[in-house]
Amino acid sequence: MGPKKAGLFQKLHIRTLRDALLTYPRDYEDRTKITPISGVTAEDKYCVRAVVGTAPAFRRIRRGLDLTKLTVFDETGTLNITYFNNKYAAATLREGQEYLFCGRVTGTGRARTMVSPAADPVPASGESPGRIVPIYPLSSGISQRDMLHVTEAALAAVAGDWPDPLPQLLRAKYRLIDSADALAAIHRPKTQQDVEDARRRMIFEELFLLCCGLQQLKERRRADNGIPFGADGLRAFLSALPFAPTGAQRRAIDEIAADCASGRPMNRLLQGDVGSGKTLVAAALCALAAANGYQAAFMAPTEILAAQHAETLVKMLAPLNITVTLLTGSMGAAQKRQALSRIESGQAQVVIGTHALIQQSVTFHRLGAVIADEQHRFGVAQRAALAAKGQTPHTLVMSATPIPRTLALIMYGDLDVSVLDELPPGRTPIETYAVGEHMRARITKFIDKQIAEGGQAYVVCPLVEEGETNLKSAEQHARDLQKALPHRRVAVLHGRMKNADKDQTMRDFAAGAYDILVATTVIEVGVDVPNANLMVVEDADRFGLSQLHQLRGRVGRGTRQSYCVFFGADKGQPARERLKILCQTADGFEIARSDLALRGPGDFFGRRQHGLPALHVADLAGDLTLMQHAREEAEALLAEDPALAAYPLLRDRVEHMFAASEDEAFN
Ligand code: ADP
Ligand code: MG
């Protein structure tokens, strides 16, 4: 490997040639379809096989803008070609020589011009040069050409030395191609069918490895001894509650109590739509732990949420004389020291915090239960790190992202599942509207009216990435809104603010010191301000449906009629269709199903919010049946051979996959 390539590998964080091959193309450009020049009739992308008719003519239009022009011809006509600021590409083209030109054509008739096409010389043999060109995801400073070099080198290096981890029987049963062939086809396909076959094979393999790993994790934990909790504390907890738990909450609490009494460590997922009351169930586990003389640790993804949970739990647990302590990264040194010593002495029975909880400096006296809220924000490894602070404590993870069963069985393959499928009584449905820009003035008035009636409003803006000029940042939007409603108190909240400032703003909003909170999705998870009754989401087409549903769940928590307004309905038919789904249903599972049908499961894996090992085929996954087969086969194989003793390569690859995920979680 030359020094240039070595540098590239470093830039790409590629440690081995194998890693290089696991950077899959995100798309392909089909350059096998060749159009005669006479067939170039629309403004579209084409590939033409043509001879250079006039030598490239170079011209400097002005400083910073060069233009190179030439014409090419085939038996059916001639076509103009221009290159901007790419003297060198054009300079390699030889008059009289035949090339395959692929690029976008603008203009019509005699003015038809192909702009900055890729040009491949047609070999002397006359063999067609057309091919399917992989398009790689790029990080800064890396070009497609670099990626082609890297993968070329990697393919050459591992040729003939890429053993297949999948059992032969499975390959035959599902007609999966060999893994070496699949990799070669992923990076250098000859036909579209090659791409399809290769993807199918790699998806199966990856999900199969994932399922094997999760299943093994589950089995290993099952063999551990758990701390048996008596259920006595539960009665006191339930009778001290200000309201009766819903039937679903009762069921979940009973399942948890049964797990905790079993002598095996609990590993349970609590899935419940936004607003279904998961915090109460978590509190029940805390009460159970405390009554049995153990500590509980409750980890939340943001400081705001941790603080809020602490308040909620104090209300529920203080009547039972259970002490609650908060630990977050932004606490002052003295305060933190005090919290740490209370945790270590066991004085703190319930500890609520952010990632700060898994830091080295935190030692528990007797940790018996751990809870992770909004679990998709944490990695498997982070959960494990928290659990490692006790001796096989009972673990509850909570998620408000409802996903269909096939996916859930894969993504939560290591957990048992409880579902909260019932909302607490007395909620009025949220009225939801999808609107376009022409409604702007009316919505601003509507915000004003809700505030006049005593309500408060959230306005959520998408994260604006560098270079995106068509979107308004939260700050900009807050300024505009303040100008439009000068008599209202507008606050802004975004991810780049200091944690303490975020926290203060959120508290002030909750206390009614602001009327409008303009925010990025930092408020997506969990915040509870019952007086807020209006949620406005700007550029809603930029969010996933489940995420919008989650945002909507921030309102409708009090007695006031609540409203949700999604801007973006004027951004084309698909956007309108998607937003309409939210107007029609408030059922998170239903919404997730629609989201899945519209975008395919790849997106669920692709967002990397699930805390699973990184999946390379994630974005490609589309076939639920294939997923189901991968899971069933993993289960069947492990039932027969739990340690994968007969499949050493498979075993290594599973280990590698999960080890890599741990590296990432701690970075
Ligand atoms: P989740 O975390 O599932 O989105 P929360 O735990 O934040 O939901 O609960 C949402 C709201 O419902 C809170 O204001 C909570 O006090 C209230 N709540 C929870 N359970 C009940 C219940 N059984 N009856 C009435 N209100 C409840
Ligand atoms: Mg919650």
Image: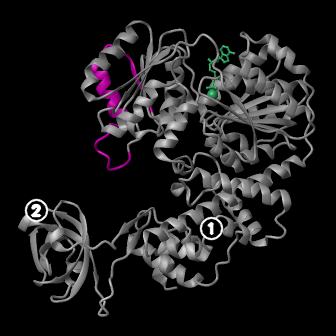
Q: Are marks 2 and 1 in contact (CB under 8 Å)?
A: no
Quarter occupied by the C terminus: bottom right
Q: Is residue 486 above or below residue 480?
A: above
Which corner quadrant of the figure contains ligand 2? top right
Say what amino acid the circle numbered 2 marks.
Answer: Thr
In which image quadrant can residue 473 be found? top left
Number of the label disc, if any, that sits on residue 108 = 2
Q: Is residue 91 left or right of residue 666?
A: left
Residue pictured at 59% horizontal, 27% vertical: 274
From the viewer's side, name the closer residue of 253 and 404: 404
Residue pictured at 82% horizontal, 25% vertical: 254
Say what amino acid the circle numbered 1 marks.
Answer: Arg
Q: Secondary structure at mark 2?
A: loop
Q: Is residue 503 magenta?
A: no
Residue 66 position, x and y percent, is 14, 71
Q: Is residue 625 above or below residue 597?
A: below
Residue 343 position, x and y percent, is 80, 34
Q: Is residue 490 magenta?
A: yes
From the viewer's side, name the closer residue of 122 and 253: 122
Q: Is residue 591 above or below residue 283?
A: below
Q: Secondary structure at mark 1?
A: loop
What segment is highlighted magenta in the picture? Answer: 465-493
Residue 258 position, x and y percent, is 87, 30
Number of the label disc, if any, that sits on residue 175 = 1
Would you say the beta carbon of the disc 1 residue lies within 8 angstroms of ligand 1?
A: no
Residue pictured at 46% horizontal, 66% vertical: 25
Q: CA distance from mark 2 to mark 1?
A: 47 Å
User: What's the colour scheme?
Assistant: one colour
